[in-house]
Image: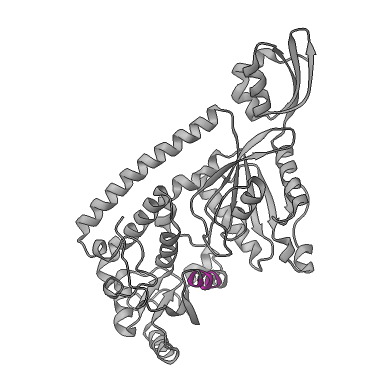
Amino acid sequence: MATTTHDTETEVQDRAILVSLVTDKIKRTGIDPELSLQELVQLAETAGVEVLDVLRQNKETPDSRWFIGKGKVEELRMAADGLGANTAIFDQELSGAQVRNLEEALDLKIIDRTQLILDIFAGRAKTREGIIQVELAQLSYLLPRLSGQGKNLSRQGGGIGTRGPGESKLETDRRHIRERITELKRQLDEVVKTRELHREHRRKSGAVQVALVGYTNAGKSTLLKQLTDADVYIENQLFATLDPTSRVLQLPGSKEVVLTDTVGFIQNLPHDLVASFRATLEEVNEANLVLHVVDSSSPMREEQMEVVQTILQDLGAAGKPQIVLFNKIDLCQPEQLEMLPTGEGFLKISAFNEEDLSRITEIISDQLAGDTLIFRIPGDRGDLSSLLYRVGEVLEQDYDGSDVLYNVRLNKEDYDKWSYKLAEFVELQ
Protein backbone atom coordinates (compact mmCIF):
# COMPACT_ATOMS: atom_id res chain seq x y z
CA MET A 1 0.00 0.00 0.00
CA ALA A 2 1.40 3.38 -0.97
CA THR A 3 1.80 5.83 1.87
CA THR A 4 2.63 9.48 2.09
CA THR A 5 5.73 10.51 3.99
CA HIS A 6 6.19 13.96 5.46
CA ASP A 7 9.07 15.89 6.91
CA THR A 8 8.29 15.80 10.62
CA GLU A 9 10.10 19.10 11.16
CA THR A 10 7.59 20.92 8.96
CA GLU A 11 4.55 19.00 10.17
CA VAL A 12 1.98 21.31 11.73
CA GLN A 13 -0.19 20.00 14.53
CA ASP A 14 -3.91 20.01 13.90
CA ARG A 15 -5.64 22.58 16.11
CA ALA A 16 -9.31 21.87 15.77
CA ILE A 17 -12.79 23.06 16.57
CA LEU A 18 -15.24 20.17 16.86
CA VAL A 19 -18.70 20.59 15.35
CA SER A 20 -21.84 18.62 16.20
CA LEU A 21 -25.16 18.87 14.37
CA VAL A 22 -28.21 17.40 16.11
CA THR A 23 -31.11 16.75 13.72
CA ASP A 24 -34.60 15.37 14.25
CA LYS A 25 -33.46 12.14 12.56
CA ILE A 26 -30.62 11.70 15.06
CA LYS A 27 -33.05 12.23 17.94
CA ARG A 28 -35.38 9.55 16.52
CA THR A 29 -32.60 6.97 16.15
CA GLY A 30 -31.80 7.16 19.85
CA ILE A 31 -28.16 8.11 19.27
CA ASP A 32 -26.90 10.13 22.21
CA PRO A 33 -25.36 13.29 20.67
CA GLU A 34 -23.46 14.18 23.86
CA LEU A 35 -21.92 10.70 24.11
CA SER A 36 -21.00 10.93 20.45
CA LEU A 37 -19.43 14.35 20.97
CA GLN A 38 -17.44 13.19 24.01
CA GLU A 39 -16.16 10.31 21.89
CA LEU A 40 -15.21 12.74 19.13
CA VAL A 41 -13.04 14.62 21.63
CA GLN A 42 -11.33 11.34 22.60
CA LEU A 43 -10.94 10.34 18.96
CA ALA A 44 -9.38 13.69 18.09
CA GLU A 45 -6.96 13.48 21.01
CA THR A 46 -6.10 9.88 20.06
CA ALA A 47 -5.23 11.18 16.57
CA GLY A 48 -2.91 13.81 18.09
CA VAL A 49 -5.26 16.75 17.56
CA GLU A 50 -5.39 19.70 19.96
CA VAL A 51 -9.07 20.38 20.64
CA LEU A 52 -9.70 24.11 21.03
CA ASP A 53 -13.47 24.34 21.26
CA VAL A 54 -16.77 22.59 20.57
CA LEU A 55 -19.58 24.06 18.47
CA ARG A 56 -23.14 22.67 18.64
CA GLN A 57 -26.00 23.24 16.21
CA ASN A 58 -29.63 22.05 16.25
CA LYS A 59 -31.53 21.83 12.94
CA GLU A 60 -34.44 19.80 11.65
CA THR A 61 -32.34 18.55 8.72
CA PRO A 62 -28.75 19.12 7.57
CA ASP A 63 -28.19 22.03 5.19
CA SER A 64 -27.49 20.48 1.79
CA ARG A 65 -24.84 23.10 0.99
CA TRP A 66 -23.28 24.03 4.33
CA PHE A 67 -24.41 21.12 6.55
CA ILE A 68 -24.76 23.37 9.62
CA GLY A 69 -26.26 26.38 7.83
CA LYS A 70 -24.58 29.52 6.51
CA GLY A 71 -25.00 31.50 9.75
CA LYS A 72 -23.33 28.78 11.81
CA VAL A 73 -20.52 28.57 9.24
CA GLU A 74 -19.80 32.26 9.83
CA GLU A 75 -19.81 31.65 13.59
CA LEU A 76 -17.36 28.78 13.06
CA ARG A 77 -15.11 30.99 10.89
CA MET A 78 -14.95 33.70 13.56
CA ALA A 79 -14.21 31.14 16.29
CA ALA A 80 -11.44 29.58 14.19
CA ASP A 81 -9.86 32.98 13.52
CA GLY A 82 -10.01 33.90 17.18
CA LEU A 83 -8.55 30.62 18.46
CA GLY A 84 -6.03 30.03 15.68
CA ALA A 85 -7.65 26.78 14.52
CA ASN A 86 -6.50 25.16 11.28
CA THR A 87 -8.99 22.26 11.25
CA ALA A 88 -12.71 21.67 11.77
CA ILE A 89 -13.86 18.16 12.68
CA PHE A 90 -17.53 17.30 12.21
CA ASP A 91 -19.24 14.62 14.30
CA GLN A 92 -21.30 13.45 11.35
CA GLU A 93 -20.48 12.29 7.84
CA LEU A 94 -20.19 15.01 5.17
CA SER A 95 -20.71 14.80 1.42
CA GLY A 96 -17.95 15.77 -0.99
CA ALA A 97 -19.79 18.94 -1.97
CA GLN A 98 -20.24 19.98 1.67
CA VAL A 99 -16.52 19.44 2.33
CA ARG A 100 -15.63 21.59 -0.70
CA ASN A 101 -18.05 24.39 0.28
CA LEU A 102 -16.87 24.44 3.89
CA GLU A 103 -13.21 24.48 2.88
CA GLU A 104 -13.75 27.43 0.56
CA ALA A 105 -15.74 29.37 3.13
CA LEU A 106 -13.49 28.65 6.12
CA ASP A 107 -10.01 28.05 4.66
CA LEU A 108 -9.69 25.15 7.12
CA LYS A 109 -9.01 21.48 6.70
CA ILE A 110 -12.41 19.76 6.99
CA ILE A 111 -12.58 16.29 8.52
CA ASP A 112 -15.69 14.30 9.43
CA ARG A 113 -16.10 11.58 12.06
CA THR A 114 -15.73 8.74 9.59
CA GLN A 115 -12.49 10.08 8.14
CA LEU A 116 -11.11 10.65 11.63
CA ILE A 117 -11.81 7.05 12.70
CA LEU A 118 -10.38 5.71 9.45
CA ASP A 119 -7.27 7.81 10.04
CA ILE A 120 -6.81 6.33 13.52
CA PHE A 121 -7.31 2.82 12.15
CA ALA A 122 -4.69 3.51 9.47
CA GLY A 123 -2.17 4.33 12.18
CA ARG A 124 -3.06 1.23 14.23
CA ALA A 125 -3.20 -1.45 11.50
CA LYS A 126 -0.17 -3.72 11.72
CA THR A 127 -1.08 -7.07 10.17
CA ARG A 128 -1.62 -7.64 6.44
CA GLU A 129 -5.32 -8.19 7.05
CA GLY A 130 -5.68 -5.02 9.09
CA ILE A 131 -3.83 -2.90 6.53
CA ILE A 132 -5.97 -4.26 3.67
CA GLN A 133 -9.18 -3.71 5.64
CA VAL A 134 -8.34 -0.11 6.48
CA GLU A 135 -7.22 0.85 2.98
CA LEU A 136 -10.35 -0.74 1.51
CA ALA A 137 -12.55 1.20 3.94
CA GLN A 138 -10.68 4.45 3.20
CA LEU A 139 -10.97 4.11 -0.57
CA SER A 140 -14.64 3.07 -0.36
CA TYR A 141 -15.28 6.19 1.71
CA LEU A 142 -13.25 8.53 -0.50
CA LEU A 143 -14.37 7.33 -3.94
CA PRO A 144 -17.72 9.21 -4.03
CA ARG A 145 -16.07 12.26 -2.39
CA LEU A 146 -13.08 12.82 -4.66
CA SER A 147 -14.46 16.07 -6.05
CA GLY A 148 -14.77 17.44 -2.52
CA GLN A 149 -11.32 16.56 -1.26
CA GLY A 150 -9.40 19.40 -2.84
CA LYS A 151 -7.58 20.90 0.14
CA ASN A 152 -7.20 17.58 1.97
CA LEU A 153 -5.45 16.03 -1.03
CA SER A 154 -3.23 18.98 -1.81
CA ARG A 155 -2.19 19.83 1.76
CA GLN A 156 1.37 18.95 2.71
CA GLY A 157 2.62 18.68 6.27
CA GLY A 158 0.78 15.61 7.54
CA GLY A 159 -1.81 15.46 10.27
CA ILE A 160 -5.20 13.78 10.24
CA GLY A 161 -6.80 13.05 6.90
CA THR A 162 -3.50 12.39 5.13
CA ARG A 163 -2.60 8.90 6.35
CA GLY A 164 -3.34 5.67 4.52
CA PRO A 165 -3.60 5.20 0.77
CA GLY A 166 -1.51 8.31 0.07
CA GLU A 167 -2.04 11.46 -1.95
CA SER A 168 -0.76 10.05 -5.24
CA LYS A 169 -3.37 7.29 -5.20
CA LEU A 170 -6.20 9.55 -4.15
CA GLU A 171 -5.48 11.92 -7.02
CA THR A 172 -5.83 9.21 -9.65
CA ASP A 173 -9.10 8.90 -11.48
CA ARG A 174 -12.07 6.91 -10.25
CA ARG A 175 -11.35 4.03 -12.61
CA HIS A 176 -7.95 3.38 -11.02
CA ILE A 177 -9.38 3.62 -7.51
CA ARG A 178 -12.14 1.17 -8.41
CA GLU A 179 -9.48 -1.19 -9.74
CA ARG A 180 -7.57 -0.84 -6.48
CA ILE A 181 -10.75 -1.56 -4.49
CA THR A 182 -11.36 -4.69 -6.58
CA GLU A 183 -7.77 -5.85 -5.95
CA LEU A 184 -8.05 -5.19 -2.21
CA LYS A 185 -11.30 -7.15 -2.02
CA ARG A 186 -9.59 -10.06 -3.79
CA GLN A 187 -6.68 -9.95 -1.32
CA LEU A 188 -9.10 -9.70 1.60
CA ASP A 189 -11.06 -12.71 0.31
CA GLU A 190 -7.83 -14.74 0.41
CA VAL A 191 -7.16 -13.66 4.00
CA VAL A 192 -10.76 -14.41 4.97
CA LYS A 193 -10.44 -17.92 3.49
CA THR A 194 -7.32 -18.47 5.59
CA ARG A 195 -9.18 -17.22 8.67
CA GLU A 196 -12.04 -19.60 7.90
CA LEU A 197 -9.57 -22.50 7.63
CA HIS A 198 -8.27 -21.63 11.10
CA ARG A 199 -11.84 -21.50 12.40
CA GLU A 200 -12.62 -24.87 10.83
CA HIS A 201 -9.48 -26.35 12.35
CA ARG A 202 -10.53 -25.08 15.78
CA ARG A 203 -14.02 -26.51 15.30
CA LYS A 204 -12.67 -29.92 14.27
CA SER A 205 -10.21 -29.99 17.15
CA GLY A 206 -13.07 -29.42 19.57
CA ALA A 207 -11.58 -26.17 20.82
CA VAL A 208 -14.02 -24.19 22.96
CA GLN A 209 -13.93 -20.50 22.04
CA VAL A 210 -14.57 -17.51 24.27
CA ALA A 211 -14.73 -13.99 22.79
CA LEU A 212 -13.93 -10.72 24.55
CA VAL A 213 -16.16 -7.93 23.25
CA GLY A 214 -16.84 -4.44 24.47
CA TYR A 215 -16.63 -0.74 23.91
CA THR A 216 -13.26 0.57 22.84
CA ASN A 217 -10.93 1.20 25.79
CA ALA A 218 -12.98 -0.99 28.16
CA GLY A 219 -9.88 -3.04 28.99
CA LYS A 220 -10.28 -6.15 26.79
CA SER A 221 -6.62 -6.35 25.75
CA THR A 222 -5.47 -5.83 29.34
CA LEU A 223 -7.74 -8.67 30.43
CA LEU A 224 -6.42 -10.94 27.68
CA LYS A 225 -2.85 -10.20 28.75
CA GLN A 226 -3.55 -10.77 32.43
CA LEU A 227 -5.40 -14.04 31.85
CA THR A 228 -3.08 -15.57 29.27
CA ASP A 229 0.24 -13.64 29.41
CA ALA A 230 -0.43 -12.56 25.82
CA ASP A 231 2.06 -10.13 24.32
CA VAL A 232 -0.42 -7.47 23.17
CA TYR A 233 -0.17 -3.70 22.85
CA ILE A 234 -1.99 -1.91 25.66
CA GLU A 235 -2.60 1.82 25.90
CA ASN A 236 -5.29 3.99 27.49
CA GLN A 237 -6.67 5.24 24.18
CA LEU A 238 -9.39 4.42 21.68
CA PHE A 239 -8.71 1.55 19.25
CA ALA A 240 -5.31 0.77 20.76
CA THR A 241 -5.48 -2.64 19.10
CA LEU A 242 -7.26 -3.62 15.89
CA ASP A 243 -6.24 -7.15 15.07
CA PRO A 244 -8.01 -10.01 16.87
CA THR A 245 -5.65 -11.94 19.11
CA SER A 246 -6.35 -15.51 20.25
CA ARG A 247 -4.58 -17.22 23.14
CA VAL A 248 -5.11 -20.45 25.10
CA LEU A 249 -6.68 -19.91 28.52
CA GLN A 250 -6.27 -22.57 31.21
CA LEU A 251 -9.42 -23.19 33.24
CA PRO A 252 -9.76 -25.03 36.58
CA GLY A 253 -9.65 -28.80 36.05
CA SER A 254 -7.06 -28.63 33.22
CA LYS A 255 -9.62 -27.71 30.57
CA GLU A 256 -8.37 -25.23 27.96
CA VAL A 257 -10.34 -22.72 25.89
CA VAL A 258 -9.33 -20.30 23.15
CA LEU A 259 -9.78 -16.69 24.32
CA THR A 260 -10.06 -14.10 21.51
CA ASP A 261 -9.82 -10.31 21.87
CA THR A 262 -11.84 -8.44 19.22
CA VAL A 263 -11.70 -4.86 17.94
CA GLY A 264 -13.44 -2.38 20.24
CA PHE A 265 -16.88 -1.05 19.34
CA ILE A 266 -17.94 2.57 19.21
CA GLN A 267 -21.13 4.50 18.52
CA ASN A 268 -21.56 5.30 14.81
CA LEU A 269 -18.79 2.94 13.71
CA PRO A 270 -18.36 3.85 10.00
CA HIS A 271 -20.30 1.59 7.63
CA ASP A 272 -17.32 1.08 5.32
CA LEU A 273 -15.19 0.08 8.28
CA VAL A 274 -17.77 -2.41 9.58
CA ALA A 275 -18.02 -3.91 6.09
CA SER A 276 -14.25 -4.24 5.76
CA PHE A 277 -13.78 -5.65 9.27
CA ARG A 278 -16.82 -7.92 9.15
CA ALA A 279 -14.75 -11.12 8.84
CA THR A 280 -12.80 -10.05 11.93
CA LEU A 281 -15.90 -9.06 13.91
CA GLU A 282 -17.60 -12.32 13.01
CA GLU A 283 -15.08 -14.16 15.19
CA VAL A 284 -17.74 -13.48 17.83
CA ASN A 285 -20.17 -15.78 16.01
CA GLU A 286 -17.79 -18.72 16.49
CA ALA A 287 -17.66 -18.25 20.24
CA ASN A 288 -19.26 -20.66 22.71
CA LEU A 289 -19.34 -17.84 25.24
CA VAL A 290 -19.12 -14.03 25.02
CA LEU A 291 -17.43 -11.97 27.73
CA HIS A 292 -18.80 -8.44 27.49
CA VAL A 293 -16.15 -6.19 29.08
CA VAL A 294 -17.53 -2.90 30.39
CA ASP A 295 -15.68 0.16 31.69
CA SER A 296 -17.64 0.45 34.92
CA SER A 297 -16.00 3.81 35.72
CA SER A 298 -17.38 5.47 32.58
CA PRO A 299 -20.23 7.94 33.16
CA MET A 300 -21.67 6.73 29.83
CA ARG A 301 -21.53 3.05 30.85
CA GLU A 302 -25.14 2.17 30.09
CA GLU A 303 -25.10 3.87 26.69
CA GLN A 304 -21.87 2.07 25.79
CA MET A 305 -23.34 -1.30 26.82
CA GLU A 306 -26.35 -0.61 24.61
CA VAL A 307 -24.11 0.16 21.60
CA VAL A 308 -22.27 -3.17 22.08
CA GLN A 309 -25.54 -5.10 22.25
CA THR A 310 -26.78 -3.38 19.08
CA ILE A 311 -23.63 -4.34 17.17
CA LEU A 312 -23.80 -7.93 18.46
CA GLN A 313 -27.40 -7.99 17.21
CA ASP A 314 -26.26 -6.76 13.78
CA LEU A 315 -23.59 -9.48 13.67
CA GLY A 316 -26.12 -12.18 14.57
CA ALA A 317 -24.39 -12.93 17.88
CA ALA A 318 -26.91 -11.44 20.31
CA GLY A 319 -28.19 -14.87 21.31
CA LYS A 320 -24.79 -16.16 22.43
CA PRO A 321 -24.37 -17.03 26.13
CA GLN A 322 -22.91 -13.90 27.70
CA ILE A 323 -21.21 -12.82 30.92
CA VAL A 324 -20.87 -9.11 31.67
CA LEU A 325 -17.55 -8.18 33.29
CA PHE A 326 -17.71 -4.77 34.94
CA ASN A 327 -14.03 -3.88 34.66
CA LYS A 328 -12.03 -1.03 36.25
CA ILE A 329 -13.89 -1.15 39.57
CA ASP A 330 -10.67 0.17 41.14
CA LEU A 331 -11.41 3.45 39.34
CA CYS A 332 -15.05 3.66 40.47
CA GLN A 333 -16.55 5.91 43.09
CA PRO A 334 -18.60 4.08 45.78
CA GLU A 335 -21.86 5.37 44.30
CA GLN A 336 -20.87 4.00 40.87
CA LEU A 337 -20.23 0.56 42.34
CA GLU A 338 -23.62 0.55 44.04
CA MET A 339 -25.37 1.14 40.71
CA LEU A 340 -23.78 -1.85 38.96
CA PRO A 341 -26.11 -4.83 38.36
CA THR A 342 -25.40 -7.94 40.40
CA GLY A 343 -26.39 -11.59 40.24
CA GLU A 344 -25.94 -14.38 37.76
CA GLY A 345 -24.20 -13.33 34.56
CA PHE A 346 -22.55 -10.24 36.10
CA LEU A 347 -19.12 -9.91 37.68
CA LYS A 348 -17.37 -6.85 39.14
CA ILE A 349 -13.64 -7.03 38.50
CA SER A 350 -10.32 -5.30 38.12
CA ALA A 351 -8.07 -6.80 35.47
CA PHE A 352 -5.12 -6.29 37.85
CA ASN A 353 -6.63 -8.25 40.77
CA GLU A 354 -5.48 -11.89 40.92
CA GLU A 355 -8.57 -12.99 42.85
CA ASP A 356 -10.82 -11.43 40.23
CA LEU A 357 -8.92 -13.21 37.45
CA SER A 358 -9.46 -16.53 39.24
CA ARG A 359 -13.17 -15.74 39.58
CA ILE A 360 -13.34 -15.09 35.83
CA THR A 361 -11.84 -18.49 34.97
CA GLU A 362 -14.20 -20.17 37.46
CA ILE A 363 -17.30 -18.50 36.05
CA ILE A 364 -16.21 -19.37 32.49
CA SER A 365 -15.73 -22.96 33.58
CA ASP A 366 -19.15 -23.04 35.28
CA GLN A 367 -20.86 -21.42 32.28
CA LEU A 368 -19.35 -23.89 29.84
CA ALA A 369 -19.92 -26.90 32.09
CA GLY A 370 -22.89 -29.16 31.44
CA ASP A 371 -23.98 -32.65 32.49
CA THR A 372 -21.72 -35.06 34.32
CA LEU A 373 -21.19 -38.27 32.36
CA ILE A 374 -19.16 -41.41 32.98
CA PHE A 375 -17.12 -42.75 30.09
CA ARG A 376 -15.57 -46.23 29.95
CA ILE A 377 -12.52 -45.88 27.73
CA PRO A 378 -10.38 -48.89 26.71
CA GLY A 379 -6.83 -48.58 27.98
CA ASP A 380 -5.41 -48.57 24.46
CA ARG A 381 -7.58 -45.61 23.36
CA GLY A 382 -5.35 -42.80 24.55
CA ASP A 383 -6.79 -40.59 21.79
CA LEU A 384 -10.22 -40.69 23.45
CA SER A 385 -8.76 -40.05 26.89
CA SER A 386 -6.97 -36.96 25.53
CA LEU A 387 -10.20 -35.82 23.86
CA LEU A 388 -12.10 -35.97 27.15
CA TYR A 389 -9.50 -33.82 28.87
CA ARG A 390 -9.57 -31.36 25.98
CA VAL A 391 -13.32 -30.86 25.62
CA GLY A 392 -14.59 -31.50 29.14
CA GLU A 393 -13.65 -31.19 32.79
CA VAL A 394 -12.45 -34.54 34.11
CA LEU A 395 -13.65 -34.66 37.71
CA GLU A 396 -12.51 -38.17 38.59
CA GLN A 397 -10.57 -41.06 37.05
CA ASP A 398 -10.72 -44.74 38.07
CA TYR A 399 -9.70 -48.12 36.67
CA ASP A 400 -11.77 -51.24 35.99
CA GLY A 401 -9.59 -53.97 34.56
CA SER A 402 -8.08 -52.72 31.34
CA ASP A 403 -10.63 -49.90 31.05
CA VAL A 404 -10.40 -46.39 32.46
CA LEU A 405 -13.52 -44.79 33.93
CA TYR A 406 -13.75 -41.03 33.57
CA ASN A 407 -16.26 -38.86 35.43
CA VAL A 408 -16.51 -35.85 33.10
CA ARG A 409 -18.48 -32.62 33.18
CA LEU A 410 -19.31 -31.84 29.55
CA ASN A 411 -21.63 -29.25 28.02
CA LYS A 412 -24.28 -30.37 25.55
CA GLU A 413 -22.77 -28.50 22.61
CA ASP A 414 -19.40 -30.21 23.01
CA TYR A 415 -20.97 -33.62 23.57
CA ASP A 416 -23.12 -33.25 20.45
CA LYS A 417 -20.02 -32.27 18.48
CA TRP A 418 -18.09 -35.36 19.57
CA SER A 419 -20.89 -37.88 20.15
CA TYR A 420 -19.92 -39.77 17.01
CA LYS A 421 -16.70 -40.72 18.82
CA LEU A 422 -17.83 -40.80 22.44
CA ALA A 423 -21.45 -42.00 22.52
CA GLU A 424 -20.66 -45.73 22.53
CA PHE A 425 -18.38 -45.30 25.56
CA VAL A 426 -20.95 -43.57 27.83
CA GLU A 427 -21.87 -45.65 30.87
CA LEU A 428 -25.58 -45.81 31.64
CA GLN A 429 -26.30 -44.44 35.11
Residue 29 appears at what percent x and percent y? 52, 63
Please tell me whether the stretch drawn in magenta is mainly helix, strand or loop. helix
Res. 393 visible in picture: yes
- When the figure is inspected, residue 411 is found, relative to residue 333, above or below; the finding is above
Residue 146 appears at what percent x and percent y? 26, 66
- When the figure is inspected, residue 361 is found, relative to residue 371, above or below; the finding is below
Residue lying at 62% horizontally and 57% vertically, measured from the top left: 219
Say if the magenta span includes residue 43: yes
Foreground residue among 265 and 95: 265
Q: Quadrant of residue 68?
A: bottom left
Say if the magenta span includes residue 159: no
Res. 56 visible in picture: no
Residue 415 appears at what percent x and percent y? 65, 25
Residue lying at 72% horizontally and 33% vertically, measured from the top left: 369
Task: Identify the magenta region.
Answer: 37-45
Q: In the image, 367: left or right of 2?
A: right
Q: Quadrant of residue 80?
A: bottom left
